């Protein structure tokens, strides 16, 4: 039995190495492609998605059925499910990416030294990007599109839950690349849902330049602990909405309900409400009315519970929990400083919002909250590359190095220095 397992590991190693080598060969050609070619590939991929929508939805139905049999929860099934509207959104996202300026070969900065040397900082692709994700099949289109636009090859390893959907989507991307005269090998999909493939990807030094995980906390932590390759990480989306004492109540209510309940299973959904103690007695019961009507379970601190009997006791763990479900933790805070301190202690550095008409309080919140995205008078569900005008995103980076916030095409570039001289020599 042990011999058989070792044999399978060797087979997977060889398979992943072959995929990596194809991706690097594809990258060499894609990195030199013109912006017009890349945009044509994206446009043709979008056209293929629309023309083959029926087949994509049929493939997705197999994934959804299998997910239901496995007992996936409602949030996971919502992320997995595709319909005509979501396929159209993928196609429109690719077209939006195509309209954006080319993020590579751009002179970021330029200056001249006293000796006459002219230096330029020029944007270039990252190389071959390995993207590991779970149940969202739309990530397949978003990731491939952004990598094509930024001149990067990509190796996609989707979750077993979305395997059939992703295969159908990648076929559309390959069609677009061929139509534009670009190498289909630049977009590789790991042809097995076996988790051993993830371990192999994390060791492919020299073939993969950057790893991006997009999924649950366990996946991200595995990448952080095991990867021998630099990674752009996004842990959890424990997002907060703070309603300040000077908030317009109707605005605050509408923002909160959208931030929590529009799609509770996405990483930008608000998981915790903080409300100023000065307005909590009058306004929290009204907010609880709206939350309860929307089907949201509420868990709060002692002060919140005393103000509305529908609010259940919150455990200490609730303040650190990304529910991805219609559950909201609620805390009454003294002022903006206590709200900031609570967020910086319990938040995940993803997205946090303040609702207020007091610009002094807003500025303090926006400056002091240590998150990749901070918002004033807006729903945290706008934490999305498409909503930022990026066309699509690969994920939200909550780290500090290289990229922070939504990772779009521009964030998938690095730079090199180009130096022009007239024969200078150094003494």
Image: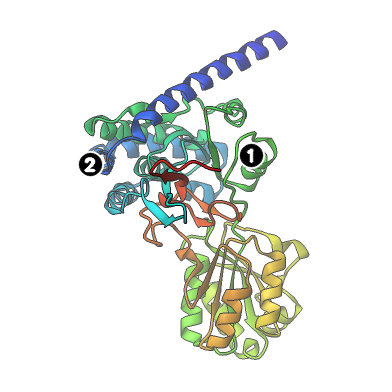
Up/down of 67 relative to 120, above or below = above
Q: Residue furthest front?
A: 427
Up/down of 70 relative to 75, above or below = above
Whether residue 337 is visible to the viewer of this picture, yes or no, is yes
Return the mark for residue 223: 1
Whether residue 1 is visible to the viewer of this picture, yes or no, is no
Instruction: For mark 2, give the secondary structure.
Output: helix
Left or right of residue 367: residue 97:
left
Q: Where residue 416 sits in the image (x, y, percent)?
A: 47, 44
Closer to the chain start, of discs 2 and 1, is 2
Please tell me how many numbered marks the rendered image carries. 2
Instruction: Name the residue nearer the viewer: 86 or 402.
Output: 402
| Quarter of the rendering occupied by the C terminus | top right
Residue at numbered disc 2: 47
Instruction: Name the residue nearer the viewer: 106 or 251.
Output: 106
Q: Where residue 201 sits in the image (x, y, percent)?
A: 57, 29
């Amino acid at each position: 039995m042990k011999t058989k397992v070792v044999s399978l590991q060797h087979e997977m190693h060889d398979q992943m190495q072959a995929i990596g080598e194809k991706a690097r060969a594809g990258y060499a050609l894609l990195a030199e492609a013109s912006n017009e070619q890349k945009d044509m590939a994206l446009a043709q991929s979008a056209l293929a998605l629309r023309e083959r929508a029926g087949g994509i939805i049929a493939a997705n139905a197999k994934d959804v059925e299998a997910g239901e049999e496995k007992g996936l929860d409602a949030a996971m099934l919502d992320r997995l499910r595709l319909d005509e509207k979501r396929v159209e959104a993928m196609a429109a996202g690719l077209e939006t990416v195509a309209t954006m300026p080319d993020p590579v070969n751009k002179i970021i900065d330029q200056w001249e030294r006293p000796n006459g040397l002219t230096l330029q900082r020029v944007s270039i692709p990252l190389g071959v990007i390995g993207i590991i994700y779970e149940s969202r099949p739309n990530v397949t289109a978003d990731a491939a599109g952004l990598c094509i636009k930024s001149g990067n090859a990509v190796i996609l390893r989707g979750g077993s839950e979305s395997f059939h959907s992703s295969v159908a989507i990648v076929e559309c991307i390959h069609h677009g690349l061929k139509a534009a005269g670009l190498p289909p090998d630049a977009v590789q999909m790991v042809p097995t849902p076996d988790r051993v493939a993830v371990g192999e990807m994390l060791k492919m030094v020299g073939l993969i330049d950057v790893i991006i995980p997009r999924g649950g906390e366990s996946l991200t932590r595995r990448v952080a602990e095991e990867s021998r390759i630099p990674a752009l990480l996004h842990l959890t989306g424990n997002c907060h909405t703070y309603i300040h004492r000077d908030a317009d109540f109707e605005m605050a209510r509408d923002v909160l309900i959208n931030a929590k309940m529009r799609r509770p299973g996405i990483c930008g959904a608000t998981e915790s409400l903080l409300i100023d103690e000065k307005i909590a007695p009058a306004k929290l019961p009204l907010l609880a009315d709206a939350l309860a009507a929307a089907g949201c379970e509420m868990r709060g601190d002692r002060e919140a519970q005393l103000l509305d009997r529908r609010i259940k006791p919150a455990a200490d763990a609730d303040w650190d929990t990304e529910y991805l479900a219609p559950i909201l933790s609620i805390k009454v805070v003294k002022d903006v400083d206590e709200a900031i301190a609570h967020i910086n202690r319990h938040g995940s550095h993803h997205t946090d919002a303040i609702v207020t008409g007091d610009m002094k309080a807003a500025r303090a919140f926006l400056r002091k909250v240590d998150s990749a995205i901070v918002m004033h008078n807006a729903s945290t569900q706008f934490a999305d590359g498409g909503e930022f005008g990026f066309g699509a995103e690969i994920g939200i980076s909550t780290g500090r190095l290289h990229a922070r916030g939504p990772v779009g095409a521009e964030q998938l570039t690095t730079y090199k220095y180009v130096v022009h001289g007239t024969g200078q020599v150094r003494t």
